[in-house]
Amino acid sequence: MATALARQPVSLKLLSSGFLALWCLVAAFPILWIAVMSVKSPVDAFDDRFWNVVTGPATLANGSGVSVLGIALYLAACWGMVRLVARQMPSLIGQIPPRRRWIGWVLGAAVVTLGAALVLFVLLPTLLAVLNPLAGPLGRDVFGFTTEHYRTVWIERGFLRNFQNSMIVTCGVVLVSLTVGTLAGYGLARSGSTLAFWILIIALVFRALPHSVLVAGYLPVFINSAEILRPILGDAAPTLYGKPLAVIAVLVAINQPFTIWMLRSFFQNIPADLDEAARVDGCTHFQAFRRVIMPVMWPGVITTGLFSFLLGYNDFLVTSLLLDAQNQTMVPAIAGMFNRETTTTDQVVAVAAAVSITAPLFILVMVFQRQIVSGLTAGAVKG
Amino acid sequence: MKFTTFSAFVGPSVVMMLLFIAFPLISVFVQSFQVTQPLYEAVEVETCTPGFLTQTCVIETRNQPVLGEDGKIVTETRWVGLQSYANVLELGRAWDAVSAGSWRALMAIDFWKALRFTLSFTLLTLPAVIALGLALAVAINNAGKRLRGPVIFVSLLPFIITPVIGALSINWLFRGDGILTALMERASGQDISMFAQAWTIEVLMMLYRVWHVAPFAAIVFYAGLQTVSSDSLESALIDGASRWQRMKYIVIPHLMPLILFVGMIHLMDSYRVFEEVVGFSSQGHVISLQWLTYDFLQPDQAGNRSISRASASAMLTMVGIVILLIPPLKRSWRDHRKAH
């Protein structure tokens, strides 16, 4: 009978897969397109003919391009590195005792990033400079390709500092909101009281608030905080406006409603018998949480952490209003680049910055696809 | 769980929410009735310029900010009642426009323009997101098992991308003679400019939002499709129900709670539409309620921020959120009462 349900006319199958193919094209095209634009000279990037943007004749004419041999080498190198990492890393890290394993992951990620940068930006270009003249027609440049816009963004425009600021804010938000949220989510999941219900409802209302409403409340206080806090803290009273720490606190609070709803639903899926058994054996609530719940809660915490990361990383409104130019994060910085009266060169530089912001997210989806999907389907909430 | 343990677990989170959400809300509410301005005083100043025989002196009164003992400008906070609300709503002008029956005049007032766009944006994208999400979920469910992973990966990209960057990437496809504008021009034989009038920008903003949110809807619905009972589908098949009837009478009712959930989340999020205005640089033509508050909060050329007007427009935005939230809150209260 199941086969009868699965049986479909050919036309329906064609329609369904055609629709899916069209959607994949629509979903990926704008993102792929900015990646293509970012490696072309301004004339090519804003050409109105599709093919000119892809091949980049003006970029080629400027003497920067990549040959068929080059493309093949780069692809082979990427493929090889991915294979190597996927095969070797888990077993290498598996040798480290479980308690320190996270250090292994952090170190491993750093080594991989460095190694990839070394191979792609140093080793391969020198190798190609030697090989291209030897390879005849295969070694001739066919596609325009230049990394100068990335160099402009990261080195001349000081995007590196924006990147560091983004990382500080994002990591701070993830760490603090997970610590605070895990405790609260556990407490709320194990308590059926009316107070717990009201906390959750108020959190739901808070989740719906437009962020600009809250920022309107912070701004005057943050700008004058030195004077407001002076009676309490004396001369050490800080001006909170422009400080990354203040923004972290704000984003953690904005993220709290979502975090506690999501973690609560994960904790509810962990059977309460587990901690009750621990309590019978003489543990307090905190000991039960630490010894019994913490070892099994990681999938939920990782998923929630991913969404907290996205909130901190993608935020524009709060960071652009509460941080000064010195501590600016990446997303407001690029909006500033774009809003100035600009030449086409500036526009392509902004495109390169946009691709630089998107690349970490791309890797994030690649590594954590399953966790993101499980977070979306966890039921109650979304970031 | 005892109350002390419960409060130890929940305490830090509640304190953070009180300090950074509830307290700012109250302070915005208070600010919206106040105006803080530098205190001015009239000073008689005598300025003399050297001249022949006698110098020429002019005495004039000038308004200048009062300086305090520490050399800073003294500011004064006054209660102005509903003045800031009146400044934002411009009821007089709005009433004139309504009584003259002139839609164009009403839309010249920032608040009403923003409200019109926010509401139409919210209501028009809602059915599009649900329909596209359902269609995608059914199509993914129909695809071979091997294909599902890669398709979901590609679908997640628009959902996960930074909203400002996503809007920009669509913007670059259409800006000036971007390739898609050029394509449409070649197809229609006309000169098309997508950023010269408001309605085309609005269409692009809505397309962007549907592109951005449909993957979320699709994945939630796809998860829901996995739990449709095959028994009831089989019995429907035996009873001779067509494919469309099985969809309409079994699958859709099964997914209904999820459709309501996605719709609710989408209403909340699209009512806060903001990043699109930044990404499409549309503030000349189209603005949203949240952007209005943001704009009041930005320092103007003299470095002043109109906090009180921002607070008033923020409180007015809140009214809409409260109206949106009443039905789901009522329902969860009923569920809670039933459960205990």
Image (cartoon, coloured by chain):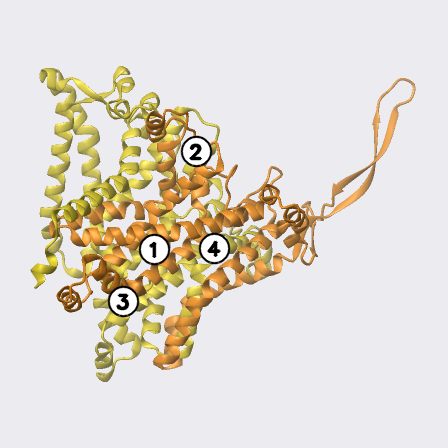
Chain colours: A yellow, B orange
Asked if residue B160 lies left or right of residue B271, the reply is left
Specify the subunit that label 3 lies on. Answer: A
Residue at the image position 33 percent from the left and 68 percent from the top? A185
Answer yes or no: are tags 4 and 3 on the same subunit. Answer: yes
Judging by the rendered image, the residue that carries numbered circle 4 is: A210
Q: Position of residue A239 (x, y in %)?
A: 53, 51
Mark 4 vs mark 1, CA separation in Å: 17 Å
**Looking at the rendered structure, which numbered label has been put on residue B243?**
none
Judging by the rendered image, the residue that carries numbered circle 2 is: A337
Specify the subunit that label 2 lies on. Answer: A
Question: Tag 3's secondary structure?
Answer: helix
Q: Earlier in the sequence, mark 4 or mark 1?
A: 4
Of residue B247 and residue A223, the one placed in the foreground of this image is B247
Question: Tag 1's secondary structure?
Answer: helix
Amino acid found under the numbered disc labelled 2: Met
Amino acid found under the numbered disc labelled 1: Ser
